[in-house]
Image (cartoon, rainbow, N blue to C red):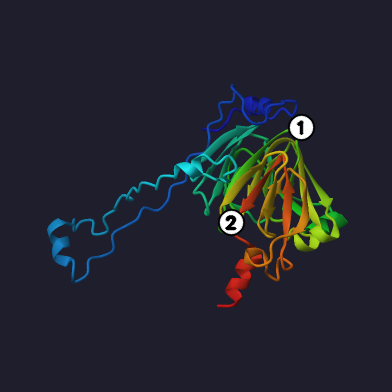
Amino acid sequence: MAPDPQKSASTVNPARVSDVSAPDFDFPPPQRQQTVPSITPPPNDVNFASFAANGNFNNPYAVQPPQSSTPPSIPADLQSQPTQALSATNQDEVGTFNGGSYRISHRDTNSVLTMQLAMGCPIEAKPGVMVAMSGKISLRGSAKFSMMKMLAGSMTFSTYTGPGEILLAPPTLGDIIVLRLSGSESWKVGKDGFLAATSGVVKDYKAQGLTKAVFSGEGFIIYHMSGIGLVWLQSFGAIIRKDIPEGETYLVDNGYLVAWNCKYTMTRAASGGMFSTYSSAEGLACKFEGPGTVYLQTRNASAFAAHLSTK
């Protein structure tokens, strides 16, 4: 059902402060994307007799429901650890924003972001991440040259304006999470972490020092997100959230950062182990200081490429 133009016009009012949830917002979340069901292969000589006795020859490719499996229970000692890393769930996440609704499905490493946009509602996304969209959605590209954007490796954004549905997905096997900005906080996002954002989010570029630029794996320029709205982040692999209490530190190997809201320095970790590689400068790692939150990805693009080159 197409959204009411008069109602959509009031929905996208920029003066509205709440960009995360709205009690009077009746725009339904996108429907769950359907996957192709598994099928039973044709019978061979071994199981033909069993198939002839029990199978349906009118429908030889009988659809079989997926088998349910009970996940292993988490040990009590791990459940009681307050600093245990929190991983992303594989359940769908749905929500609304000023002018639309969204659903993140097929998690953790094949995630897709489905959005329903009301009339006139714009969404800004990274170029090349659009999977499909409704015919009524308009697309406009923006390219404003600056030295910061050139060094950041991304000079353009694609703006999609409703009404209609749009599907976005990371270019690699990865997950999607959403950050909710209320205007009082800001996040730093790695060079490959940005996927999309609502119109109220302010996207800027910040320069890093030489040491961080060379050894953190994020380059000289990183994204700086602030304002009011939603930011969708992408990853290579699954995403893990780590909350760092005040007074504590946490070390992250380079190439695994997605986003963070606390300061960090480059430090030398213990020699040997996962840090002692050429790509991590023989033991250098990112040392974060609490309080704050860090989002990590479970795969490193550079390490994965190096692994493939040796095969």
Query: Which residue is pictured at 78% across the width and 60% down the height?
Result: 219
Residue placed most toward the observer, 123 or 147: 147
Residue 93 is situated, as x and y percent measured from the top left of the image, at: 53, 39
Judging by the rendered image, the residue that carries numbered circle 1 is: 184
Q: Is residue 277 visible?
A: yes
Q: For mark 2, give the secondary structure.
A: loop
Q: For mark 1, give the secondary structure.
A: loop
The image quarter in which residue 52 lies: bottom left
Residue 311 is situated, as x and y percent measured from the top left of the image, at: 55, 78
Seen from this angle, which residue lies furthest right?
147
Q: Find out whether the residues at labels 1 and 2 contact each other: C-beta distance under 8 Å.
A: no
Tell which tag, 1 or 2, sits nearer the viewer.
2
Question: Which sits earlier in the primary sequence, circle 1 or circle 2?
Answer: 1
Q: Is residue 154 above or below residue 204?
A: below
Q: Is residue 154 visible?
A: no
Q: Is residue 93 above or below residue 8?
A: below
Q: Label 1: how many residues lie within 10 Å, few (<14), some (14-19) or many (20+)?
A: few
Residue 298 has which mark? Answer: 2
Q: Amino acid at mark 2?
A: Thr
Q: Amino acid at mark 1?
A: Ser
Residue 127 is situated, as x and y percent measured from the top left of the image, at: 69, 54
Query: Which residue is pictured at 56% across the width and 30% down the height?
Result: 27
Residue placed most toward the observer, 7 or 67: 67
Q: Label 2: how many residues lie within 10 Å, few (<14), some (14-19) or many (20+)?
A: some
Q: How far is the residue under mark 1 from the one under mark 2?
A: 29 Å
Q: Is residue 25 above or below residue 119?
A: above
